[in-house]
Image (spheres, grey):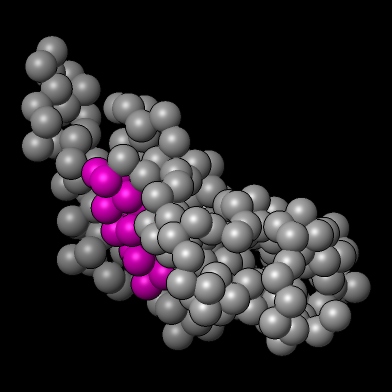
């Protein structure tokens, strides 16, 4: 069956097909363009149905996201970012939740690739733009209650904010780095306060 088929696909079958294209995360044998084409097709099929009930579940996106994230190539990194965005769109449109672990994997992947030896400055800055995009979308989703088991533990960790800020500073993006350091310090103050002011956690 081609990815352009109009025949509805069972979610479990679809997930197996996409995972097969990704060959269990082995970049040497994966067909990443085909996997992405199938993922995009299922979103198009969902849109065409006009249904408010999703025809797949979030695992359809989570499984390939993790397979792509561990391949550590430029192609797989871009594809994983594409899938992560699709996962966020799916969660917002069909009122499902996301896990903080998916956000951390996406950010770690982009930071590692940006700081990798041989990465051009242009490419690194594109990846840092993506990190900031994901941070903003995660913050919005947390406020909207879209993060699983939402509580104070879902506030971004100080270590992550510090690492993002350090990467931004390394590439001369000092104003953005300063903003994150201020957010980091705000979190420290909030933890030290017995009342934990709400504005510092937003």
> Which residues are the magenta region?
129-144
Q: Is residue 142 magenta?
A: yes
Q: Is residue 105 visible?
A: yes
Residue 115 horizontal/vertical position (percent): 53, 65
Q: Position of residue 161 (x, y in %)?
A: 34, 47
Q: Quadrant of residue 174?
A: bottom left
Percent of width and height locating residue 102: 53, 48
Q: Answer whether residue 167 is visible to the viewer in this image.
A: no
In the image, farthest residue toward the top: 194
Left or right: 91 as drawn, with respect to 63: left
User: Is 34 in front, or is 169?
Assistant: 34
| Quadrant of the image occupied by residue 128 | bottom left
Q: Is 73 within the magenta?
A: no
- Residue drawn where x is 76% and y is 54% of the image: 12
Residue at position x 60%, y 60% in the image: 55
- Looking at the picture, how far across and down is residue 191, in whole percent? 21, 22
Indicate left or right for 12 with 100 as reference.
right
Q: Main secondary structure of the magenta part?
A: helix
Q: Quadrant of residue 94?
A: bottom left
């Amino acid at each position: 069956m081609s990815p352009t088929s109009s025949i509805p696909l069972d979610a479990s079958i679809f997930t197996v097909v996409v995972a097969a294209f990704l060959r269990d995360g082995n970049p040497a044998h994966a067909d990443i363009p085909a996997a992405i084409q199938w993922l995009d097709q299922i979103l198009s099929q969902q849109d065409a149905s006009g249904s408010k009930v999703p025809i797949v579940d979030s695992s359809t996106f989570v499984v390939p996201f993790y397979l792509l994230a561990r391949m550590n190539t430029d192609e797989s990194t871009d594809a994983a970012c594409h899938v992560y965005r699709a996962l966020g769109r799916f969660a917002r449109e069909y009122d499902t939740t996301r896990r903080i672990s998916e956000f951390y994997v996406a950010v770690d992947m982009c930071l590692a690739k940006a700081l990798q030896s041989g990465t051009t400055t242009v490419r690194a800055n594109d990846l840092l733009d993506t990190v900031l995009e994901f941070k903003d979308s995660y913050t919005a989703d947390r406020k909207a209650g879209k993060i699983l088991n939402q509580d104070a533990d879902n506030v971004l960790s100080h270590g992550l904010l510090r690492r993002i800020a350090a990467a931004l500073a390394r590439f001369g993006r000092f104003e953005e780095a300063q903003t994150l350091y201020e957010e980091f310090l705000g979190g420290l103050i909030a933890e030290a306060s017995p009342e934990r002011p709400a504005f510092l956690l937003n």
